[in-house]
Amino acid sequence: MDTLIYSHDACFEHRPGPGHPESPERLRAVLAALRSPEFADLKWREAPLGTREQVTLIHDPDFVDQVIDASPRSGYVALDAGDTVMSPGSLEAVMRCVGAACAAVDDVMNGEADNVFCATRPCGHHAEPDRAMGFCIFNQAAIAAAYAYDTHKLERIAVVDFDVHHGNGTQAAFYDRPELFYASSHQSPFYPGTGAAAEKGSSDNIVNVPLPRGCDSAYFRERISAEMLPAIRAFNPELLIISAGFDAHAMDPLAGLNLQDDDYYWITDELMKIAKDCCGGKIVSILEGGYSLDALQSSTTAHLRALSGRPAREA
């Protein structure tokens, strides 16, 4: 597989404060995985800056202006009750996230790569059209889907989210848009409190797979195989976007699921099979959560092994 990586040093400069889980060290762990000799053949590009026009494909213009105006020259500004924080480098970082996601859509649609992984931060799937929350400022996965619809005139775009937290922002943005499909597996009950199986969207374009605390590999694969994968295939997407959060890993300190590295390889490989059948393999994967640095590095390795067509374990 021809796999492309987007990243940018500006993404280190989102610094929400000492002790905050969404730290620059997360990206260092991801890049350590991607820069291992095993992945020496992957292509790299610098994430471009996104545009206000791209952001407003999902987010309300007034909210976008509020975020831009709130960007501090020094210190910190909280955008919600306290866990979504901007530092002086945050605005450029999040605009690099948006730019990478949209450029990745262009690359797979124009045949420059089979799939793309955006190694960027901060994460985005909690950001709703009119508010930031849950460490997330703008929702780059949802923006990428809307960009594919608006720019490439696709009629069916799917976002699949296996972060341990439900992507309430993506669901809110997609709920009344039948051309946009959202599927999520997540711990429940848990933050942010959304993601019940009964939340289906206006056109059955939402599929939620809530998982109980302690969920292991076997139960995860059983539920995904029965409830999520057939629904994605039935939607028949022209592009598949992955919100790739790795905080359902057993080592993650912020959650309570018990997934292993092999589970991330498995679900990525299953999504690649669907993408191959439905859309010529076109996948854009975007980093979301993951707060154990060791698990983040090993899970990213598993994810990229699948995306790039490698076996689950290095020979």
Image (cartoon, helix red, strand yellow):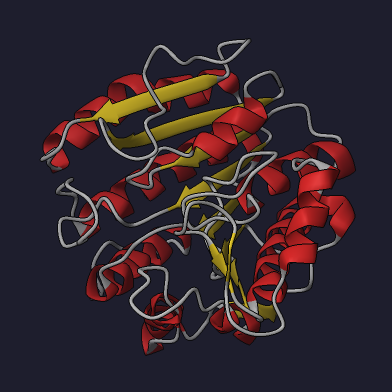
- Along the viewing direction, whichever of 70 and 306 lies nearer the viewer: 70
Query: In the image, residue 196 lies at what x, y percent?
Result: 37, 20
Q: Residue at x 59, y 78 (%)?
A: 11
**Residue 49 in the image: above or below residue 140:** below
Count of numbered circles on the image: 0
Q: Confirm whether residue 282 shows in the render.
A: no
Give the left or right position of residue 258, taking residue 78 as reference: left
Query: Image point 40% across, 49% down: which residue?
Result: 268
Name the side, left or right, on which 190 lies relative to 202.
left
User: What residue is shown at x 52% (from left), y 82% (from top)?
Assistant: 41
126, above or below 188, in the image: below
Relative height, residue 37 to residue 252 (above, below): below
Task: Pinpoint residue 58: horizontal percent, then vertical percent.
Answer: 75, 40
Give the residue displayed 85% in from the left and 61% down from the top.
51
- Residue 224 on image: x %, y %: 31, 30
From the viewer's perspective, tell me whether residue 169 is left or right of residue 134.
right
Q: Is residue 169 above or below residue 292?
A: above
Q: Is residue 195 visible in the rendered structure shown here?
A: yes
